[in-house]
Each structure stands twice: as C-alpha cells, then as structure tokens.
Image: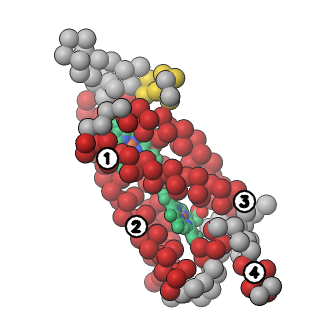
C-alpha cells in the first residue's frame, strides 16, 4: 500500500523509525567512541553501520517511488521549504555516512567486519601494532567526509526533531501522529 494524505503506509513508518532510531544510536556511539577512544565500540558501530546501509537503500528507493508525504495543512511556504531542505539533507547524509565510513576503515587498513564476518581484511603492522593503510589519502578524505557529513546530519536531526515537537505541541496538528501510524481523519471523526 502506498502513502495517502490521511495515512502513511506501514512500510514508510517502519523504515522511518528503524533507520531514524538506528542512526541516532550510531551518531551517539560514533562521537562517544571517537572522543573517548573506546575501541571495543568500533566493531559494533561499524557492523551496525554496514547492516543499516541495506535498509537505507530500501528506504531511499521507497521514498522516491512513493513520493514525499503530502502536506497535512497549509503552512507558510518558508516552513514547508525548510522541512523539505532538512528532509533532503537527512536523505543525502544517510547515504554518505555508511559509504564514507566503510571506505575510511577499509582504505585505512583497519578492515571492515559485520559481527565477526570479515568483509575487508585488516592490515596491522605486527611489530608496532598499527594499521597500514592501503590508501592513506583516500582514508583521510573519507574520514573528513564522515566527520563533516556527521555534523551536518546532527544539525539536520536537531531541526527535524524541533519541527516535529513544534507541530505536535504548538500547532497541535497531525504531522507526528501520522508518522506514528495513526489515521488522523478516523481519530478526529470518532471524537
Ligand atoms: C548511517 C551510518 C553511520 C553513521 C550515522 C555514523 C556516524 C558516525 C559519527 C557521528 C561519528 C563521529 C564523528 C567522526 O569522528 O567521524 C562516527 C565515527 C566513526 N565511524 Fe561512523 N557512522 C556510520 C557508519 C559507519 C560505518 C559503516 C563505518 C565503517 C565500516 C563507520 C566507521 C566509523 C569510525 C571508524 C569512526 C571513528 C572515526 C575516528 O576515530 O576518527 N561508521 N560515525
Ligand atoms: C525522535 C526522532 C524523530 C522524530 C520525532 C521524527 C518525526 C518525523 C515526522 C513527524 C515526519 C513526518 C513529516 C511529514 O509528514 O512531512 C518525519 C519525516 C521524515 N523523517 Fe523523521 N523523525 C525523527 C528522526 C529522524 C531521523 C534520525 C531521520 C534521518 C536520519 C529522519 C528522517 C526523516 C525523513 C527523511 C522524513 C521525510 C519523510 C520520509 O522520508 O519518510 N527522521 N519524521
């Protein structure tokens, strides 16, 4: 079933929350492990990052065959445009993040595994125990990309959540309710 103005499909809702909540967890873990050098978290961050990429591809494909959710009520053009820009930034960064992470780790010689299943072999110097990059320049560029795209994504997530809160608690409309799977025309007509 496709999305309608009154009700979003189960697939849209499932993909939004599965990807959205996983990404929030990856961002929190990514910053925490990087700032505090918590190395045991790296393989978990990388494994979940690779797995969620498969879901992200389905999510982005579905968004484009299905179209964006229709506007619930007439909002100011500036508000609508801001929401659209934020949605585009979220979609673009959710594609860049797993790809840049994968190439950063792979090219950097650290390897990529999904919960122990090796996808790109690590390459460590046996004496100094440091990774030997396959391509240091590429790894460095992808590391910068992961970081800049990560902070751009965080800014967009903050605006996005602020927007959802504003709609729900200030405008008191059905934007959040619809993303939670409610058919709001039915809800209001039974009141
Ligand atoms: C949607 C997926 C992902 C998100 C949202 C995400 C997010 C982040 C964030 C916000 C950081 C901290 C900022 C930084 O230093 O770059 C980070 C760090 C990191 N991420 Fe990811 N990441 C994702 C996928 C991946 C994948 C697939 C890999 C590797 C296979 C990966 C490897 C890393 C590594 C190695 C770091 C630490 C970088 C360092 O120590 O400088 N990430 N991630
Ligand atoms: C607690 C966190 C979140 C809340 C409360 C929330 C809420 C919402 C709501 C209410 C909508 C519907 C907007 C409309 O009807 O036009 C929406 C759409 C959207 N959200 Fe979130 N969201 C959250 C987290 C995220 C995260 C982390 C991402 C991506 C990284 C994300 C990406 C999107 C995108 C791209 C859309 C546009 C419609 C779609 O593609 O499904 N959201 N969100």
Q: Horizontal and vertical percent for residue 98?
A: 45, 43
Q: CA distance from mark 3 to mark 4?
A: 17 Å
| Residue at mark 2 to residue at mark 4: CA–CA distance | 29 Å
Q: Quadrant of the N terminus?
A: bottom right
On residue 187, the disc is 4
Observer-side mark, 1 or 3, equals 1
| Circle 1 crowding by C-alpha within 10 Å: few under 14, some 14–19, many from 20 | few
| Residue topped by disc 2 | 158
Residue under label 1, please give it.
Answer: 32
**Are discs 2 and 4 less than 8 Å apart at CB?**
no
The local secondary structure at tag 1 comes to helix
Q: In the current view of this chain or complex, which residue is farthest to the top?
A: 127
Residue labelled with disc 3: 10
Q: Position of residue 100 (x, y in %)?
A: 39, 41
Residue at image location 44% in from the left, 35% down from the top:
44
In the image, residue 171 above or below residue 34: below
């Amino acid at each position: 079933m496709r999305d309608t103005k009154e009700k979003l499909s189960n697939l849209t809702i499932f993909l939004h929350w599965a990807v959205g909540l996983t990404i929030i967890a990856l961002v929190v873990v990514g910053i925490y492990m990087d700032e505090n050098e918590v190395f045991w978290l790296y393989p978990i961050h990388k494994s979940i990052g690779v797995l969620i990429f498969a879901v992200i591809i389905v999510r982005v494909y579905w968004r484009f065959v299905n179209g964006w959710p229709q506007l619930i009520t007439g909002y100011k053009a500036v508000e609508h445009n801001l929401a659209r820009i934020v949605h585009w930034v979220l979609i673009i960064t959710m594609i860049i993040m797993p790809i840049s992470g994968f190439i950063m780790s792979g090219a950097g010689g650290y390897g990529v595994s999904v919960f122990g299943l090796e996808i790109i072999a690590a390459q460590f110097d046996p004496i100094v125990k440091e990774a030997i990059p396959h391509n240091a320049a590429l790894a460095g560029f992808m590391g910068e990309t992961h970081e800049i795209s990560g902070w751009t994504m965080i800014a967009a997530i903050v605006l996005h959540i602020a927007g959802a809160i504003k709609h729900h608690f200030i405008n008191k409309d059905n934007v959040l309710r619809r993303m939670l799977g409610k058919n709001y025309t039915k809800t209001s007509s039974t009141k």
